[in-house]
Every structure is written in C-alpha cells, then in structure tokens.
Image (cartoon, rainbow, N blue to C red):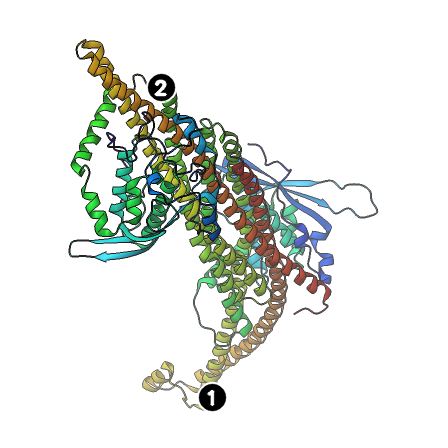
Amino acid sequence: MEAEGRVPGPPPLPPAGGGIGAELPAIPPGAARAPLLGAPAEVLELDDEEDDLEVFSKDTSLAEANSFSPSMTISPSSMINQYKFEDEPELRDLFITVDDPESHITAIETFITYRVITKTSRGEFDSCEYEVRRRYQDFLWLKSKLEEAHPTLIIPPLPEKFIMKGMVERFSDEFIETRRKALHKFLNRIADHPTLTFNEDFKIFLTAQAWELSSHKKQGPGLLSRMGQTVRAVASSVRGGVKNRPEMFTEMNDYMETFSQKINVLDKIAHRIYKEEREYFNEMKEYGPIHTLWSASEEDIADSLKGVASCIDKCCKATEKRMAGLSENLLPILHEYVLYSEILMGVLKRRDHIQSELDSKIDALANKKADKDLFSEEIGKLEDKVECANNALKADWDRWKQNMQCDMRSAFTNMADNNLHYYEECLATWESFLASQTVDCHGEEDSEDRP
Amino acid sequence: DEPVPAEGRHTAVPGRALHEGTQQMEDCLAKKMEITVSEAEKRTGRNAMNMQETYTAYLIETRAVESQNEGQCSPVDSLWRRYSEFELLRNYLLVTYPHIVVPPLPEKRADFVWHKLSADNMDPDFVERRRIGLENFLLRVASHPVLCQDKIFYSFLTQEGGWKEMVNETGFQLKADSRLKALNATFRVKNPDKRFTELKHYSDELQSVISHLLRVRARVADRLYGVYKVHGNYGRVFSEWSAIEKEMGDGLQSAGHHMDVYAASIDDILEEEEHYADQLKEYLFYAEALRAVCRKHELMQYDLEMAAQDLTSKKQQCEELATGTMRTFSLKGMTSKLFGQETPEQREAKIKILEEQIQEGEEQLKSKNLEGRDFVKSAWADIERFKEQKNRDLKEALISYAVMQISMCKKGIQVWTNAKECFSKM
C-alpha cells in the first residue's frame, strides 16, 4: 500500500503540561500500568480477576487528559522508555476478534462484511462489549485516519485489495479467510500499540454502529484533499528532503532498503516451497495406490506391497499437514512484513518531508531578512514538530524491530517444528513397517514348509 | 578417461544370487568362481562401417574360490567386454535355452529418468549403475543351475579373443531369427497349459505395474528434489539478511547453514533410490523373459496342434480314397468327379503315399508331444525357481526402500532440530 504523506491534523488528544505535542502515547489514569508492548498476543478472554487488578477509574474528568504522576519527569523519551519493556499479557484491556464473513448483495455491488467483537475494561468505553460489522473499505478508512494523525508512527499493514499473483479469486473462501486473519491481526496490532490504541477514530471504528460510522467518516479531509497531500509529499521527497537528515534515520533507510529486498525474496522462497510441496503431494497421492494395485497380482509379497502403500499414504497426509502449517503461519507473517517494509519506507519519507518543511523555512529565513520574528516563531513550531516526529519514529522503530525479531523467531521456529513433526511422523510409519517385515522374515526362516 | 574407482561404491549383492537353497546350487559356477565387473572405461574405436565411435568397456574379473585348506589367494583373470557382447551372450542363451527364464541385462538406454538425472549413456552415474547391473547379470547366470554349465558362458568370462566367432559358430543366429518372427506372430492355441496362460497374464500385469511405478517414482523424485533445493535459497538470503541484523544475525547465519545442509542432502538420498529403481527395473525386464517362455510353450503347443490337425486330415483323406466315399468336401474330390475318376493304380499310389506320410506324422506327433511335455516340465521347474527368487528379491527391495526412507527421515530430523535451535536463538 502506498504510504500517503500527511500534514498532521489536529492532535487526537489534548496536550497537557508544557508544549508536548500530539505524538505522546496517552497514559491511562493512574499511570501505573501500560498497554501491552511486544509480540501481538492472541486474543484472550478477560478473566474475572482482572477487574480487581484494574487501576482504571471511571472518572471522566481524567479520561481525556494526559495525566502524569507529578513525580515523573516530563520528557518524551522517558515516557516512551516506560512502555518499552513491559510485556505482560495480563495487562491487556482491549480484546478484538474479527470473524464471521458475510456476503451482502445490493443493486450496485456485492461486498463482504466481517464481524468485529471488542471486549474491554477501559473507562473511556461506554460499554465493555461491542459487536459491529465492518467492510474492507472501513478498514482502509481507519488506516488512513491513523496515518493522518500519526505520520511518523508505523501503522500496521492491511491485506491488499486484490491479489495479483496466485489464482485466488476475489471472493473465494481461501481469499476471504486469508483476508479475515489479516484484518484480525491489523486491529490487534493497533490495540497493542501504545499510542494508536487510544486513537479516537480507532475507538469509533470498534464501537460505532454502521450509520454512525458513515456520518463520522464524512467529516475530515475528503479523498481528493488526501490525494493532494500524497502528491505534495512525494514531490517533496523527490526535491530531496534529506539534507539535514540525522544519521540515525539514514541508517534506518539503509536498513529498510536491504530488509525490504530480503523479506521480498524470503516471501517468494516460502511460496515456492509451498508450491513444490503441493506438487510433491500430488505425485505421492498417485504413488501409494500403485503398490496396492500391484499387490493384487501377487501372493507372497502382497502384504509387503500393501504395507509400503500404506506408509506412502500416511507420508502423503503428513505432507498435507506440513503445507497447512506453512500457509497458516510462515506465509502470512512473511507477507505481512513485505507490506511492513513498504509502510516503513513511507514513514521514513514522511519524516523526511516534515524535516524538509523546517529546512526550507530555515533557508527562507537565511535569504529574507524581513519578517524575522514571524519566521522564528514558525521555525520554533516546526522544530518542535520535527523533534516529536523523530522521537515518535525512533520509539516506534525500536518497538517494531523488537516485534519483528519476535515474529520472525516464532515464525521460523514454527516452520522448523512443522518439518520436524513431518519427519517424525514419516519415520514412525516406516519403522513400524520395517518391524513388521523383519518379524515375517524370521517367521519364514523358522518354518519348514514352503508355500 | 579414468576407470571408476573401486572404493565406496555399490556392488551387486553376490550373496543374493547365491542364496538359492536347493541342492543343485552346490554345483553352480558362482560357488566355484568369484565374478566381478570391477571397472568401466571409455574407449574409442572403429565400428563395422569403419566410422569412429565411443563406447564403454567393462572389466570382468574372475578368480577361483579358494579352498579352505590353501592359505593362498588364487590369481585374478580379467578381460574387457562391451555391452554389445553381453547382448550377444544373452541372445545366445535365450535361443539355446528357451525353457529358461533368462536373466535380463540392465537397460540399454536410460529410461524412467527424472530430470536431474542424465539420459546420456556416457554419463558417469549411468555407467556406474550399468556396471553394477552387468555384474548382477553375470552372477545370476553363474548361479543358475542350468545356465552356469554353458560353455559359451564360461568362455565369455575367461576367453578374451575369438569368443564372438565361437558364438556365431553355434549357428544360433538362424534360430534367433525364426524365434523373433515367432514371438511376434499372432496365432490361436486351442489347448494351452492353463498355468502358462495365467503366467503370461501375470507377466503382462507385472510389466505394466512396474512401469507405472517407475514412472511415478521418477516424478516423485523430481518434486522431492525441488522441495529440498529451494530450501537452499534460505541459506543464501539468511546470510545476506544477517549482515544488517545485530541481535538476530548469529541465529540467522547458523540457521542458513543448516538450510544449505538440508538442500545438499537430497543428492545422496536420490542416488540411493536409483539403485532401488534398478532393482525394480530388473524385474520389469524379467517379465519379458517370462513372457518369452510362455510364448515358446504356445508356439510348441500350436505346432503340436497343427501337426495333429494335419495328421487327422491325412487320415481322413486316406479313408476317403480307400472307401470311395467323400465325407468332406474337397476340391480334389470335386475335380475328380467333374473330370473323371482316377485309375485304381493312381488311387493305390496316392493311398501309399498318404500312409507313409501318416506314419511319419504319427512319429513326429509322438516326439512333438514328448518335446512339449518335457518343455512344460523343465520350464515349469525353472518358473518355480524364478518365482521364489522374485519373491525374495522384491521383498528385500521393499525393505531396503523402507530403510532408505528411514535414513532420509532421520537426516531430516537432525537438520531441522539444529535449524530450530538456531531459529529459537534469533
């Protein structure tokens, strides 16, 4: 998906304290606990005990504010550091599932909606359980709103609109299921994100009824203006907004270029392996039965032949399981990170664009001695903007890298596990066949009679 | 070109060929003589049309089996033979012993190949597998109670020069031509021995099912090769990726190494499987030899039936001439009716000739009957021997296939256990 550059709109949360911008992660009242960081966890059912653990108060006066415990330092980086290593699943207070795809047919179009169920104990939610229906368009809307609000945060990827490669039809069961899983992941990644989880549009997405959502969507910059922003952002990046780019972000850029390359190749490799395994499976399906056919014209070796046939059939089934493991685990994760690499390149571009605004204003100031004071104030604001953008990106980058490492580790470990189980199953099958054959052999050697 | 090295390669299992349990085996050649096809060498020479050709020559080594008392090693005799000479030997055996299921030669051209395997006769892997197949052929013949006593076979093993001439002097070629014609002819036998009819069906089924199996096996091998080799790409990309990762780098790099090991392991695995395929191929070709014996029986039976039919009709003719009645329509009878009867002298002469022919015919029929019964008896004995050999060999082959699969699984478990450990450290 093309990352669209955005001029940040009004911050979703009112700033508190001195001059801290919109990019700070919101802190729940009490500040003692933080939302989950780390790998996207499975959706867990809320335990009853968790209610006792909750430090939330339903005091609405606190709900909107970024309140801090006075003893804490008010620097952005220390805020961010606080969340980095808290990784306890029990701290989740927002659980989302996406399921139950349903087809809707109108005079104009056919589309699919998905059921989105949210369970939460958060105070800012009026209820603790919500059930809504959303279509793909709604997810697209949510993503663009998040990008708009947080241009230098890493918004999780959405599944693609269409799948060009592969022979999956638009509304095939396979396509819908793959999309459903990806949408589920998308919402959960947002829920796990320290900042995004408190985004207002996210809340509306999860809770609003269909008509409420449509009317809410109509507010804010329209599609055309958003498109204009994209053009400007791309143009500005072409003009070269990389003049004073901090070393860190150049490193990030270089890293992303290589990472993007590698992840794309890995994605291709994994798909190719899946394809080869499927072809192998198809041939194996034919291989086993030939032995059974042969056994029909034999007497003495009929049992051995049937034994081999049965082993081959079992290995065939094991291959099917191995393929399923690939398609359920490794393939979706690799694909997600292919999308992530595009997103990250976009985020880096947007950061550069924000910086280039500052740089060009500074240049303008250097050339025009007039309106110095006005410029200084504007420059001050832009400097803050750049600092916030950079900090937000840096924090999110670190978090993303940690998640990526975790995801990759688990995905590849799972792949290795799949293969292990496959070989273990096949081994057991053939060993038991061999045992049966050697028993027979000894039987024959002992017996005096020949058939 | 260098001859194929002697170490670490497969040999045909002599024990297998010697494993016949019956008393006759005590006298077979294989017990008295060690036979190996130990080397293969590329040669160039001129063929019958004086054109230059390249071929492979195989070194046959023979050595008398040392008796227990002597502590010495007997000397090794050796000579070189090429594939076409093996073919000549086999054709000779086929013609000379039609009641024997003659062991087959390894294939002339590589068939049932999966794509990575070369179909080139000069390919070293093909040559190596053929060497083993030729050794196996010689051992099978040497351990056959009847065939091992053949002098041409013995000379093949021991006499380098003049062997071809010796074979041709037996005049077997004439028989070979008529045999070939007969095998291809279609005719209907009225009373074949049911066992042979069943056996022919069996050999057809065996041929069909083994061909099918070999074809699919080749495709399975192809696909398996693909699965393993694509994993090799992981090795390369992990290594490149590890260069930009600080914490994940080590795990990625070492996992990549295991992926390379995994990808490389398929080559040996599939090479082993080729030997299994060769074992099946031998019985695919044996099916042809079985069918040849059945055909021979049919031929003899047909011959017998034709002779009996001829005899019956001659007897009838004789009777008609003697009694003057015409029970069956004959052109001669009609013409004689139209153009006048024969003279009594003519009739007498005819009857005499017929009676001579009838006597000859009866003797021939008797001997043909005897021949037929002898053939059936000795052929069936060899077929029973063959059946037992086939059951033993195929069961062993299936077991060895299972052993190969087990080895492949164990290798897989090892590699993926290692890879998993590396991944979990990422």
Give SS at disc 1: helix
What residue does disc 2 label? A246
The amino acid on which the numbered mark 2 sits, given as a three-letter code, is Pro
Provide residue B231's location: percent of width, then percent of height: 47, 39
Q: How many marks?
A: 2
Provide residue A129's location: percent of width, then percent of height: 35, 53
Give SS at disc 2: loop
Q: Residue furthest right?
A: B69
Seen from the viewer's position, the closer of residues B418 and B156 is: B418
Please say if A409 is above or below B325.
above
Residue located at (73% from left, 46% from top): B64
Please say if B40 is above or below A439.
above
What residue does disc 1 label? B322
**Chain ID of residue with mark 1:** B
Provide residue A154's location: percent of width, then percent of height: 34, 34
| Other residues around mark 1 within 10 Å, as few (<14) / some (14–19) / many (≥20) | few
The amino acid on which the numbered mark 1 sits, given as a three-letter code, is Ala
Seen from the viewer's position, the closer of residues B375 and B103 is: B103
Please say if A38 is above or below B99.
above
Residue located at (29% from left, 37% from top): A146
Q: Are marks 1 and 2 in contact (CB under 8 Å)?
A: no
